Amino acid sequence: MFLPSFRHLIEIEALKKQNQQNLLQIASENKRISDLEERRKKTAILIDSLILDDKNLKIADTNGQIELLQVRLKKLNSQLALAVTEKEQVAFENQITLIKNECDSLENIYFANLEKSELIEIEIAENKEFLKGSLESLEIIKTEASSNISSEQTIIDNRNLRIQALVELVHPSVKSLYSELEKRFSPKSPVSYLIDKKCSECHMQADSVLKNSLEEGRSIEACPSCSRLLIPETAKIY
Ligand SMILES: [Zn+2]
């Protein structure tokens, strides 16, 4: 008397398995979007940090310092020209050498940083280019994904209607045990098959009494070992 119910359960389980494939497809469509969004987010953070690096080179500040030193140098040179004593002359010359050295070292820093800044600006421009281009790709992917997801969802919805219709056909006693085990084993399957007297999931060996009454559809059995609802192999034959 339970054999037709077992057959329905086999079909329900098969349909659910097919749903899993469509759900995987939906997940992969969503992942396409989130992967690109993640890359764009990382790129925006990178751009911010590059801008900060560029700012920290303080190129304008160094240039300002150099200009100030050059003004001082000019002034010292004119003072040197007006120096009366040799002592004054030597003092000015010493100051001039000192400031020239300082100026040289600042200029070295200035040009090295200028080179670094140019490289950073190229990197910023490349990353901004990616952000711009990927925004367009993202829109295209989103449109594509949403159409793919909606067709996958339609397939799932239709299949779920078929599952619901089949569940209605299952004997109430089988149905109640099935729905109870379904909650317990979710997201795994709550059923296993009795094949060659063995549970297909846990390989528990059944005795002949259980096997016979199950195969003849006289009883509903949960596997004594793994508690899954046992479906006799004979129910597989339509
Ligand atoms: Zn088992």
Image (spheres, grey):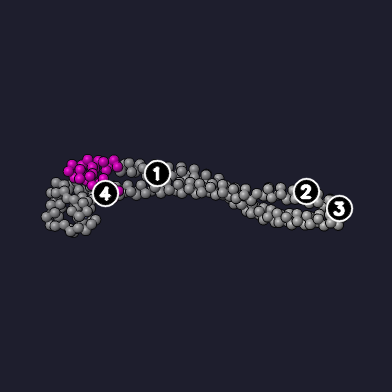
- Residue 24's x, y, as percent? 37, 49
Decide: marks 1, 3 in contact (CB < 8 A)?
no
- Distance from label 3 to label 4 (Cα)? 99 Å
For the residue pair 158 and 104, the one nearer the viewer reads as 104
**Residue tagged by mark 4?**
185
Q: Label 1 vs label 4: CA separation?
A: 27 Å
Q: Give the label on residue 71, or none.
A: 2
Magenta highlight range = 160-189
Sequence-wise, the earlier of marks 3 and 2 is: 2
Query: In the image shown, does 147 or 74 lie closer to the viewer?
Result: 74
Q: Give whichever of discs 1 and 3 has the lower sequence position.
A: 3
**Mark 4 Cα-neighbour bin, 10 Å: few <14, some 14–19, many ≥20:** some
Nearest to viewer (mark 3 / mark 2): 3
Q: Which residue is mark 1?
A: 149
Label 1 vs 4, first from the N-terminus: 1
Q: Residue at x 28, y 47 (%)?
A: 186
Dot 3 crowding, Cα within 10 Å, few <14, some 14–19, many 20+: some
Would you say the residues marked 3 and 2 are in contact, meaning their CB atoms lie under 8 Å apart? no
| Residue identifier under label 3 | 83
